[in-house]
Image: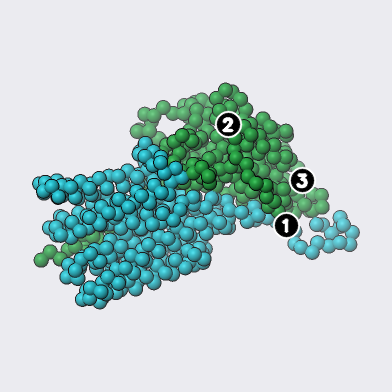
Chain colours: A green, B cyan
Amino acid sequence: MTAASPRQAAVPLPVWQAGGTRMGFFTDSSICIGCKACEVACKEWNGVPDRDPAWSGNSYDNTLRLGANSWRHVAFVERHHPDQGGGLQWLMSSDVCKHCTRAACLEVCPTGAIFRSEFGTVVVQEDICNGCGYCVSACPFGVIERRQDDGRAFKCTLCYDRLKVGETPACARACPTESIQFGPLDELRERARTRLEQVRQEPGHEQAQLYGADGSDGVGGFGAFFLLLDKPEVYGLPPAPTYRRSELATMWGMASAASMLILAGVVGSLRRQRR
Amino acid sequence: MSPGSHGTERAMVPPVQPRSYYGLPIVKRPAWTIEVPWYFFVGGATGALAATAMAARRSGQGRLARRARRMALLGSLVSPILLISDLGRPERFLNMLRVFRPTSPMSVGSWTLVGLGSALGAGEVAEQLGLPGFAVTGADTTAGVLGPILSTYTAVLIGNTANPIWRGARHLLPFVFAGSSLASAGAAVCVTSPVGDAQAGRRMVGWGTVLEQGAGLAMERKLGDLARPYREGRAGTLNRWQRFSSLAGSALVVTWGRRSRRAAVIGSALTLAGSAALRQSIYQAGFQSAEDPRYLVESQS
């Protein structure tokens, strides 16, 4: 997190900031088999509405994107690689809300409906959200969305209800290859670094990279991060997602200057009319 | 396919190296509806009119002050209607005032609108009841200070998103909105005042349009390739319209508008239409910018 102002320091810090345990996901796409058990388990546990089946034509992906009604989404990328069977390499990865350290959706929410849980996750309170839609445009990953027939915003809760009773989130529990791993974020990051070294040795995986695994990126690191086998944009992920309060402060500075111009324009226009 | 693995067969299409995920959008399209750009327009003019009322009161132009305040009051009553009807759950609009969150421009804006509307209402009531002058001046001054914030915070609101065409212009958008608000407030003064009484309005139209169009051009230049939506599709059409309408309207206001009431009204109408079309164009550009993932990837590589 950015340095808290004295005013904010009065509010008790979430457990994970006060030295408690921040929980998260490590999605290791190198062992994802594209079974979509995570998508199904998530929908069933969280009661996420389904939709009429439709074929996209984009490989085996008919979910297409994360949204109000899809909190896990398995991407299927078909790319050329000379060393792989038939010259085709198939990349699969299960995408999810990143539970950012600096979460734009949470910061811009005007009602306080989006909050930081004691597990360091980012959760929407459905009894408070009034569907203003600001989080939808603010999210650098295009994760959160307003549900059409409902009007409120929905996204992955990292199974807040299951975490509360010490259970593993539904998607991680259902994943047959442990491509989705759940646990304390520090441990997961450590494990991911070791895993990346292994994966890089394998032929065709030279471009393997961790995405969101440390605090150096534009959102201060993800609570749910990934091991990817190609560039993020190939999976439909932004290359450099960013949210910073300092940028907002600069914008307010610009708006103040612009406001002064309005005042100057008005006062200047009214002058000399005094007769 | 590698040629060796399939005997004499040769690949007839180049090897696939995806640059995006099937060309699907990365960030979401705005969830907002058409009320939002209309609110940008109405709220912008309202804020600048509140500033006009304050300046007029302080320079002893009571008639102009009253006129400007009443128009601003009307705007501050229309604004919440537009905002509430855009909500996914309109019946929960009061949740906007559940917290004050400095990191959310929408929260700051909601409180500003409430404060501005109250101050304008208080000024009007104080004057109607014949309360002492300082009460009226106090209310008008409060409104006049909050007004320009209402005119420009909406630019911060959209600049503080992940949308490439808004985020990329986040430092210039407040100036575009400020100019547009000043011009439309001036036009509103011109429409409601006789020619001899509207010199201030004409100047506001002139200076406002200079700022609006100048900052608008700077914004497109700053955006570079990201500005393409301002030249294509609906956002492009609206952008051409707003430029023509604003420039023609303000030129008419500051020339013939000085002598002819009819020219002043036509010119002001064009200026107002230009300001509204500008907000529509910026709003629409947000959709076009989100729909093509190339903009987002370009802006981040």
Q: Tag 1: residue type? A: Val
Q: Pick whichever, B139 or A235, lies toward us.
A: B139
Which chain is home to disc 2? A
Which amino acid, by three-letter code, is at mark 3?
Pro
Say which of marks 1 and 2 sits in front: 2
The image quarter in which residue B222 lies: bottom left
Q: Which quadrant would the N terminus of chain B be assigned to in this image?
A: bottom right
Left or right position of A22 against B157: right
Q: Is residue B50 left or right of residue B301?
A: left
Residue under numbered circle 3: A203
* Residue ID for mark 1: B16
| Residue occupying image coordinates x 56% and y 43% | A68
- Where does the C terminus of chain B fall, quadrant-wise? bottom right
Q: Residue furthest right?
A: B7
CB atoms of marks 1 and 2 within 8 Å: no
Q: Is residue A241 visible?
A: no
The residues bearing labels 3 and 1 have C-alpha atoms spaced at a distance of 18 Å
Q: Position of residue B15 (x, y in %)?
A: 75, 59
In the image, residue B277 sits, relative to residue B100, either above or below, namely: below
Label 3 SS:
loop
Q: Nearer the viewer, residue B26 or A195?
A: B26
